Image (tube, rainbow, N blue to C red):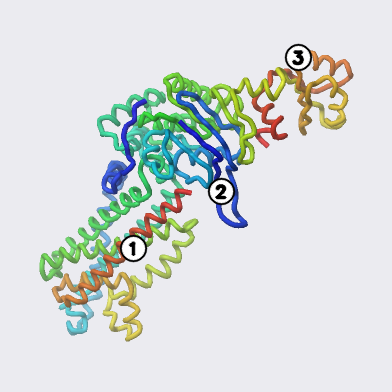
Amino acid sequence: MIEARGLRKTFGAGASAFEAVRGIDVVVRRGEAFGFLGPNGAGKSSTMRMVAAVSPISGGELRILGLDPATDGPSIRARIGVCPQEDTLDNELDVWENLFIYGRYFGLPRAVVRERAEELLEFAKLTDKAKSRVEELSGGMKRRLTIARSLINRPDLLLLDEPTTGLDPQARHLLWDQLFRLKQAGVTLVLTTHYMDEAEQLCDRLVVMDKGVIVAEGAPGELIRTYSTREVAELRFAVGEEDNEVMAEKIADLADRLEVLPDRILVYADDGESVLAAALDRGLRPVASLVRRSSLEDVFLRLTGRTLVD
Amino acid sequence: MTVPTGSAALGLRDGTLRQADYWAALWRRTWRGVLATSFLSPLLYVLALGVLLGGFIKADPARMEGATSYLAFVVPGLIAAHAMQLAVGEATYPVMGMIKWRPTYQAMLATPLQARHVVAAHLTTIALHLAAATGIYMLVMVPFGVYATWWGASLAWLTQIGVGMAFAVWIYGITCRLRNEEGFGLIFRLGVFPMFLFSGAFFPVANLGRVGAAIARCTPLWQGVNLSRMLTIDHITWWIAAINAGVIVLLLVGGWRWAHTGLERRMIT
């Protein structure tokens, strides 16, 4: 579905040139859910815009659905659905019109678009809002409408750029459910996110991006196994106590790896409870502690030395 | 899933027509206001300038470019100037809005539509707006007896749409190249307003002296004012009419390219 080799994107020229994507290789296969995980500014959205055939590549090779976006942009866009980071819904139109008019841009006959609009309103749980103005919808409803709109052409490939950013937990879970249903229906999903739980929930495979390059690639579980331990103990100390670095030295031998963050110490080990008990035996008195399984956040921290929300 | 269309070579006409429902939806919400202002504005202008002010102006028709009354002289100029103002208005804030403030164009360009389709559809709606506004303006003038022939009036109407669109395409391209709306003030203050006053709409450009008249005759608005006035009062010098029409056509052709390359540069980055 997507094949990129040495893909680059540069904005500007000369001394002010900024390279947002610096030679990435990506292959996305039919029917899989593929993710680009990384913090803001990692190059995820620039990559998505190139894949959506609305931003020319600056270097390397890119094939979408076997076609070259430089010459076959309209053909590619006819077969993909795009859910951009910022809603591009038309506030001057009502919910139903947003679907209908967008379908017409694809050259679909009016009767076909009407039928699909009804189906998609049902899918997005917005049937009772069909005649509402867009500005009356909640953030979650707008995202669902944007996703529904991106499905009006029954795309082979659905691109979702930060689909749940800014949504409350309930709205996120509803959206995940809908994306999961699409995945089960065989739609190839490509999404960017900086939420590790979202990537773990939805992605069969993902790449971790940082500063325009791919720093790791694989299935979420595989990445966690490769780059982290099974569990992590988190220790948080009261303000005014000894420096986290000093605390960390006292338990360094208990862990496979330690990460000292400004607000807490992460102790990586296969048995987090044992590490926590041993730390308490050594006289450490954290004000808060927890043991959890490793996540993609830990993978990112290991690979870049930074958290996803830096 | 099935592939709906193959759009590799989507023609300009097809791509433009795909947006007809969008523009029709917007028009359904605004047509009453547009038609009401299109009717009221010319009526007030003509009453104030043509009838009330014009009542004080008695001049030899030779000094009024062949017009037998000041009303007959001023009406074609007023309509052409109105077309310019309307076109500039439509090609500035609404276009910037669709680029920047509400991402309408971004949504359109995520589909098989290309920048040239989007520009063609938007300019078509401006042309239709101009046709409606200038058409109503001209109909309002019928009872005042300013038209010498029906065919002259018809050609004058086309001229007014043409001169309006000559402004629309160029201003559209400028808007696409502006980072923000601050440049619009310059367009209105240094472009539209002086042209409105000094391009022969209210008085013969000969009154400006040799240099002033030459400068005025170089403006796009004068081409429209002069041509539509000649056609309205049936006092036509054909070689001048051909130059006026030729300039308007050249402006339209060059401006079309300037407009769609502008949107492409702005949106496809």
Judging by the rendered image, the residue that carries numbered circle 2 is A10
- The x and y percentages for residue A114 are 29, 30
Q: What residue sits 14% from the left and 64% below the top?
A: B142
Image vertical order of residue A140 relative to residue B118, above or below? above
Using the image as rendered, state which of residue B16 and residue B11 is in the foreground: B11
Could you say whether the residue bearing mark 3 is in a helix, strand or loop?
loop
When asked about the image quadrant of residue A266, the answer is top right
**Dot 1 alpha-carbon crowd within 10 angstroms: few under 14, some 14 to 19, many 20 or more:** few
- The x and y percentages for residue A87 are 46, 38
| Chain to which the residue tagged by mark 2 belongs | A
Could you say whether the residue bearing mark 1 is in a helix, strand or loop?
helix
Disc 3 to disc 1: CB gap under 8 Å = no
Using the image as rendered, state which of residue B104 and residue B267 is in the foreground: B267
- The x and y percentages for residue A182 are 44, 23
Mark number displayed over residue B254: 1
Q: What residue sits 36% from the left and 36% below the top?
A: A78
Upstream in sequence: badge 3 or badge 2: 2
User: Taking B102 as reference, is B51 left or right?
Assistant: left
Q: What residue sits 35% from the left and 84% below the top?
A: B211
Amino acid marked by disc 3: Asp
Asked if residue B25 can be seen in this view, the reply is no
- The x and y percentages for residue B110 are 41, 40
Judging by the rendered image, the residue that carries numbered circle 3 is A271
| Chain to which the residue tagged by mark 3 belongs | A
Amino acid marked by disc 2: Thr
